[in-house]
Image (spheres, helix red, strand yellow):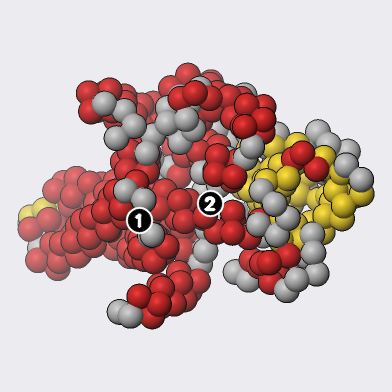
Amino acid sequence: MALDPETFDALIDNIRRFVGERLRPLEAQVEADDAIPANVVQEMRDMGLFGLSIAEEYGGLGLDMLEEARVAIELGRTTPAFRSNFGTNVGIGSQGLVMAGTPEQKAEWLPRIASGDIITSFALTEPDVGSDSGSVKTRAVRDGDVYRLSGTKRYITNADRADLFTVMARTGDEPGGRGVSAFLVPKSLAGVSIGEPEKKMGQKGAKVADVIFDDAPVPVANRLGAEGEGFKIAMRVLDRGRLHISAVCVGVAERLIADCVAYAGERKQFGKPIAEHQLIQAMIADSKTEALAARALVLETAAAKDAGKDVVMESAAAKYYASEMVGRVADRAVQIFGGAGYIADYGIERLYRDVRLFRIYEGTSQIQQIIIARETMKRGG
């Protein structure tokens, strides 16, 4: 473990209290305002949440994957927008730099990312490119000591707040991912502009928007790795990100199950609490069993990743199962709450909408199925 057990347990306890006492009471406000209060964001900075996965030498907490997954489970017990606020700094927005950055690049950016002074974002998806991520059309053309970057990225999380983008762009004529390179692109660079945030089905308070590059002069020194390595970097980043999201799904499911148990114990029909009706018990049992299975898969895979094992298949399986699982749990929660589950005051319908996105971003369920099948066949079973 990156932290000694006593220190890590204290961190978990602190986060658990923060979620229960500070964040959950603000859920309805965040939904209504479509924004997270600035003072709460500052509290997250002070707790070190923006630097969970960044090494201590750069000012982060330096958590390993298993520790990060356990933290993500705790953070999943509240509106996903809170975690998303710093999630790109912890995951896809910073990990390309962590994995492939030069010592100079790391020294320049990672301390400010870990402190939350800089917000990062990961720019891969385009108007015509989603699941087929090796077909990016955004181009970076070498011009002396800069690359001229042009193109549009779509549905980019935290784009409205980001100071630094990890951008995937085509630098060569090779087909597919072989012609894609990765770049660190500051928002302040000439030719970079941000579109208006999109109106979304759920996860209010977490914004996505277009990022437009119009002949932006990106210094050669801002390239991550060699030319043509961008797709490999992106896939490595997504492997870790998928485990993180899987853990969040587990946390949301556990929150929903606890809410269901509390409500079912109080709500009475036919002269007794609905928790005593076997068909309600069946839904709770199914939800609990699936949540336990997802937790076990996520934590086992995280430990294997920390041990240096190849977990491409297992990460995809965790993302696939956990994201589908939490959707089923949320659906059962609405059913257990009945009419109340459809009413905004109880928050169940909000989480029902929030969790739908987990089956789409960082690789759809269908993409995970393809990865799982491909890797299984490679391994011979």
Give the residue number, with chain letter if any, for mark 1: 309
- Point out residue 58 in the picture as x, y percentages from the top left corner: 53, 25
Q: Nearer the viewer, residue 96 or 150?
A: 96
Image quadrant holding the C terminus, namely bottom left
- Point out residue 32 in the picture as x, y percentages from the top left corner: 54, 40
Q: Quadrant of residue 155?
A: bottom right
Seen at 85% across and 48% down, the residue is 147
Q: Is 239 above or below relative to 42? A: below
User: Total number of numbered labels?
Assistant: 2
For the residue carrying disc 2, how many other residues have a C-alpha within 10 Å: few (<14), some (14-19), or many (20+)? many
Query: What is the spatial separation of the Cα atoms under label 2 and label 1, in whole angstroms?
Result: 15 Å
Q: Quadrant of residue 285?
A: bottom left
Seen at 48% across and 51% down, the residue is 241
Q: Nearer the viewer, residue 371 or 147?
A: 147
The reply to whether residue 349 is in sight is no
Numbered badge on residue 350? none
Give the residue number, with chain letter if any, for mark 2: 237
